[in-house]
């Protein structure tokens, strides 16, 4: 307990000394105390002693390393020192050696054997003891004089005594500094100053030459200030200094001329015009010098600053050459201010263009970091059009120097699929959430856009943004597929150069700069884009089964194989017609689908389910309409995740829409396409007319359904599927493949009348499909009713006849309905035991007492509905096709023509 109490007290002192936390903040003090205590306990329990064997191994390693790099003398000295240490070894030797090893800093490079001579020299017995100021002060007694250390007031009011004290203190301080520094002489500014032979005369001459700067303004008789006259050489020197960005007397900080001076021998207007010309040059250069003086943290702006500094340095060199002509005069020189201004024109003109870019950049509100690249690009093109070669060359070189920095994140993205963390200048961003692999292409990365919807990228790069973005995403996908190394091996070794000298050659000086840059940059992108895109396309087709996956989707959803699709659909229809609930069971439905498509797709990838909304209807309702049961059936085929990039979930939904419509069409055809039921009562009065009406309506419905099926398979699916295959083969990258497949889905949806514009027409087509089911149900009920009547008549005839043989019973049983309610014979009942025959309203050859229409009237109404539906579909298709400019309008018009042929053929036929 005493140890813990002592340790706690020491930790409290340590925390109070190091953290300087007020005592009122007790919570922080306790937290720091607990952290320190835990750290001490951990270190004490885990690092008790140094591992001596580890220290020895490390020293031997140093010796071996010294010999490997050729420093054998150093290795020998290390061995000699270790051997000498063995005599003095104790239990703390490993700890001391460990401490020395921790302090070592690259001994193989920084060790110097000459340092050992200082250790071997020892103390010099002949050297005299050094005399210190402390000894002198003690001997003289002025160490006890406290007044010597008092503060001295160096203000102008201080007396001679204070000045003497200050001088003595200063001299004493200098002596102390010299004594502490040893005998080595310390160089001062006086030692570095050059003292010419005629220094005084030269200084006087300089002072006389600069006297005009400090001359008081003279006044005329009226008290107005006169101008100070200056010479041409003085004005030239001040102007050159001003253009160099230095402070001058003739120009203020804004490069405006000071009106207190005038050139001797010229009028005021002439001087003002001349000095204003120089001032205007300085004002144009001022934004450049202020911009390069700013501190920028964005690399893109830093390289722009560096380019501007180089351009200004070139100007300063020209100014220095002009100054040298008038300082070191080797021959007679005439000071011509206008001549110097004209001489500087070629050097200043390109800088004026740069200054305009900087001023425009500073005038905009919150410009992007790459905004100056756009301005430079435009300025280069303008200089080329104006024929200003010097400006064109300077701006062009600066543009490409800066563009190299902007190329770095583009190169990193296109070669490695990586983004620079925290980079706000690049136009690609990554989602913070990790998405599933099939969604990487579409959702993991996005193009940055402004609030106005513009891409966050320079304007001159926007035509190439798509390929840059696609190439980077291709690299990301290839990394997930473990094939990134293959792209590196296949990538072109020689990257095309993107610089001014390579792109803007003299032979192409009349070609616009924008076209030269665009062609060169497209070549640069293609060197990286083609390899990544070609590798990914090859993997999708050859390794991950893109073609096989599309074939499977067409087999299942587009019913490209009629026999297999018929096997699946007929199995489902049998369950519906038998009022069996098995079609609602996803396991049974999956088994049916896998069995039907087992020869053309991978069965383990295929599954089926039923939309819960489709389970709410009874068996009778599900059977009587194509709208209730069939849309609830959903087939799912699991593709490889790289293939799902090309065929996303949205596209699969389009496949399902076509699958449902094709299944509905097959349902209507299957109801109508059955052997015609014969009966012995065909000669009854009115029965022949009813049959004629039924045959006519049945024929029209069959013709309509087959026309729809022919149109879908021959004019919609077949040509669009072939176009899709061709588009996928010719697509240069994955985005183009996605676009080709998306266009395929949109096209077949639109041409098959499943789009939102043609929804009323689609609903009318489904009404005709439902009408086919109603016609067959009405005919079936009528046949059963007539068969029951014949059976009853036959039964009564047999009962009234004296001869009761089996012949009559056999004839009656031929048309009698199957017995209901017996075990194993419930195909005509639904899951609730409902009798399908009783679900249809009773009809007869004539109107019955309960008010129901006769069978003939019902058929006539159905035929009228069919004609009305058919005319609506055909007319609607024709009208939409004429009013629309979509590509599918031609197909709509063709379908309308096909349906109008049926109207012309059967429209005038009389219905009894």
Image (spheres, grey):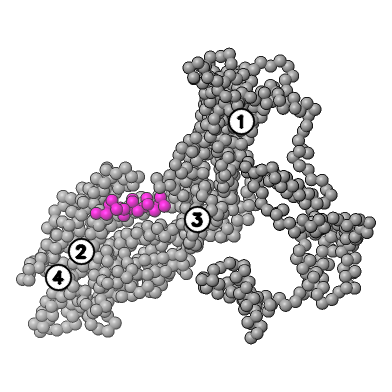
Residue placed furthest toward the bottom: 1
Q: Which numbered disc covers residue 430?
A: 3
Q: Is residue 57 magenta?
A: no
Please name the residue shown 18% across and 61% down the image. 694
- Residue 528 shows up from this direction: no
Q: Nearer the viewer, residue 242 or 604?
A: 242
The quarter of the picture where the N terminus appears is: bottom right
Please name the residue shown 78% across and 43% down the image. 187
Looking at marks 1 and 3 on the same chain, the residue that comes earlier in the sequence is marked by 1
Task: Quickly name the residue at label 1.
Answer: 244
Q: Are marks 2 and 3 in contact (CB under 8 Å)?
A: no
Q: Which numbered disc covers residue 841?
A: 4
Q: Mark 3, residues whose alpha carbon is within 10 Å: few (<14), some, or many (≥20)?
A: some
Q: Which secondary structure lies at badge 4?
A: loop
Q: Are marks 4 and 3 in contact (CB under 8 Å)?
A: no
Q: CA distance from mark 1 to mark 3?
A: 46 Å
Q: Nearer the viewer, residue 200 or 770?
A: 200
The quarter of the picture where the C terminus appears is: bottom left
Q: Are marks 1 and 3 in contact (CB under 8 Å)?
A: no
- Side (left or right) of 145 relative to 819: right
Residue stretch rendered in magenta on the structure? 742-760
Looking at marks 2 and 1 on the same chain, the residue that comes earlier in the sequence is marked by 1
Marks 2, 1: nearer the viewer = 1
Q: Are marks 2 and 1 in contact (CB under 8 Å)?
A: no
Q: CA distance from mark 4 to mark 3?
A: 65 Å
Please name the residue shown 27% across and 43% down the image. 883
Task: Quickly name the residue at label 2.
Answer: 775
Q: CA distance from mark 2 to mark 1?
A: 100 Å
Marks 4, 3: nearer the viewer = 3
């Amino acid at each position: 307990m005493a140890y813990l109490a002592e340790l706690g007290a020491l930790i409290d002192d340590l925390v109070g000394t190091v953290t300087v936390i007020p005592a009122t903040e007790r919570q922080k003090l306790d937290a720091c105390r607990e952290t320190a205590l835990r750290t001490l306990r951990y270190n004490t329990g885990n690092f008790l002693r140094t591992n001596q064997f580890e220290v020895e191994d490390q020293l031997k390693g140093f010796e071996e390393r010294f010999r490997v790099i050729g420093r054998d003398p150093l290795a020998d000295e290390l061995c000699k020192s270790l051997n000498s240490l063995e005599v003095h070894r104790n239990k703390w030797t490993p700890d001391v050696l460990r401490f020395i090893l921790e302090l070592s800093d690259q001994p193989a490079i920084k060790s110097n054997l000459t340092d050992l001579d200082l250790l071997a020299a020892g103390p010099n017995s002949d050297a005299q003891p050094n005399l210190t100021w402390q000894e002198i002060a003690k001997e003289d007694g002025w160490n006890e004089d406290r007044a010597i250390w008092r503060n001295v007031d160096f203000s102008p009011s201080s007396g001679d005594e204070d000045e003497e004290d200050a001088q003595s203190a200063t001299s004493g301080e200098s002596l102390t500094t010299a004594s502490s520094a040893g005998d080595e002489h310390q160089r001062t500014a006086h030692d570095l100053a050059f003292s010419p032979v005629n220094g005084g005369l030269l200084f006087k001459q300089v002072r006389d030459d600069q006297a005009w700067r400090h001359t008081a303004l003279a006044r005329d008789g009226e008290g107005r200030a006169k101008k100070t006259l200056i010479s041409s050489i003085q004005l030239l020197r001040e102007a050159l200094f001003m253009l160099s960005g230095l402070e001058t007397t003739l120009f203020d900080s804004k490069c405006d001329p000071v009106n207190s001076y005038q050139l001797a021998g010229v009028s005021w207007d002439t001087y003002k015009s001349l000095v204003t010309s120089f001032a205007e040059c300085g004002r144009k250069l001022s934004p450049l010098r202020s911009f390069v003086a700013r501190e920028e943290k964005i690399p893109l702006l830093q390289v722009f600053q560096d380019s501007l500094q180089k351009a200004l340095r070139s100007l300063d060199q020209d100014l220095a050459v002009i100054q040298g002509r008038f300082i070191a005069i080797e021959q007679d020189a005439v000071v011509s201010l206008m001549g110097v201004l004209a001489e500087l024109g070629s050097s200043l003109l390109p800088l004026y263009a740069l200054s305009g870019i900087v001023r425009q950049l500073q005038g905009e509100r919150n410009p992007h970091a790459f905004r100056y690249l756009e301005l430079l690009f435009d300025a280069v093109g303008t200089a080329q059009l104006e024929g200003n070669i010097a400006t064109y060359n300077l701006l062009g070189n600066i543009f490409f120097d800066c563009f190299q920095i902007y190329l770095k994140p583009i190169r990193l993205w296109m070669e490695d699929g990586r983004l620079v963390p925290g980079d706000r200048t690049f136009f690609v961003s990554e989602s913070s959430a990790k998405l599933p692999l099939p969604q990487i292409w579409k959702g993991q990365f996005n193009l940055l856009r402004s609030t106005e919807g513009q891409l966050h990228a320079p304007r001159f790069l926007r035509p190439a943004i798509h390929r840059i973005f696609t190439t980077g995403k291709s690299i990301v996908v290839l990394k997930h597929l473990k094939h990134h190394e293959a792209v590196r091996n296949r990538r072109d070794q020689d990257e095309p150069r993107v610089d001014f000298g390579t792109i803007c050659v003299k032979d192409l000086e009349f070609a616009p700069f924008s076209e030269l840059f665009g062609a060169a940059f497209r070549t640069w992108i293609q060197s990286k884009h083609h390899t990544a895109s070609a590798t990914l396309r090859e993997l999708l087709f050859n390794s991950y089964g893109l073609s096989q996956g599309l074939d499977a989707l067409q087999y299942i959803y587009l019913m490209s194989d009629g026999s297999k699709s018929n096997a699946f659909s007929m199995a489902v229809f049998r369950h519906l017609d038998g009022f069996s609930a098995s079609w609602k069971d996803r396991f049974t439905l999956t088994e049916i689908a896998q069995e039907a498509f087992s020869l053309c797709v991978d069965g383990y990838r295929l599954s089926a389910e039923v939309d819960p909304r489709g389970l709410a209807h009874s068996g009778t309702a599900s059977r009587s309409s194509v709208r209730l049961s069939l849309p609830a059936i959903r087939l799912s085929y699991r593709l490889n995740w790289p293939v799902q990039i090309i065929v996303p979930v949205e596209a699969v939904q389009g496949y399902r829409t076509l699958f449902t419509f094709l299944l509905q069409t097959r349902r209507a055809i299957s109801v109508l396409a059955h052997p015609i039921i014969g009966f012995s009562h065909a000669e009854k009065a009115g029965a022949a007319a009813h049959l004629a009406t039924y045959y006519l309506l049945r024929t029209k419905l069959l013709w309509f359904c087959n026309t729809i099926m022919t149109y879908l398979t021959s004019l919609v699916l077949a040509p669009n599927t072939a176009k899709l295959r061709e588009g996928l083969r010719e697509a240069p990258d994955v985005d183009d493949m996605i676009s080709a497949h998306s266009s395929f889905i949109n096209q077949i949806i639109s041409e098959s009348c499943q789009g939102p514009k043609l929804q009323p027409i689609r609903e009318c087509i489904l009404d005709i499909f439902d009408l086919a089911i109603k016609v067959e149900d009405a005919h079936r009920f009528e046949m059963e009713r007539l068969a029951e009547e014949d059976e009853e008549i036959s039964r009564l005839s047999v009962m009234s006849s004296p001869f009761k043989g089996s012949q009559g019973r056999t004839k009656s049983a031929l048309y009698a309905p199957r017995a209901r309610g017996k075990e194993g014979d419930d195909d005509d009942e639904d899951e609730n035991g409902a009798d399908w025959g009783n679900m249809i309203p009773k009809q007869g050859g004539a109107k019955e007492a309960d008010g129901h229409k006769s069978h003939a009237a019902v058929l006539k109404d159905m035929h009228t509905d069919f004609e009305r539906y058919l005319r609506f579909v055909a007319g609607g298709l024709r009208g939409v096709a004429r009013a629309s400019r979509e590509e599918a309008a031609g197909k709509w018009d063709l379908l309308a023509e096909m349906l109008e042929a049926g109207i012309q053929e059967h429209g005038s036929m009389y219905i009894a």
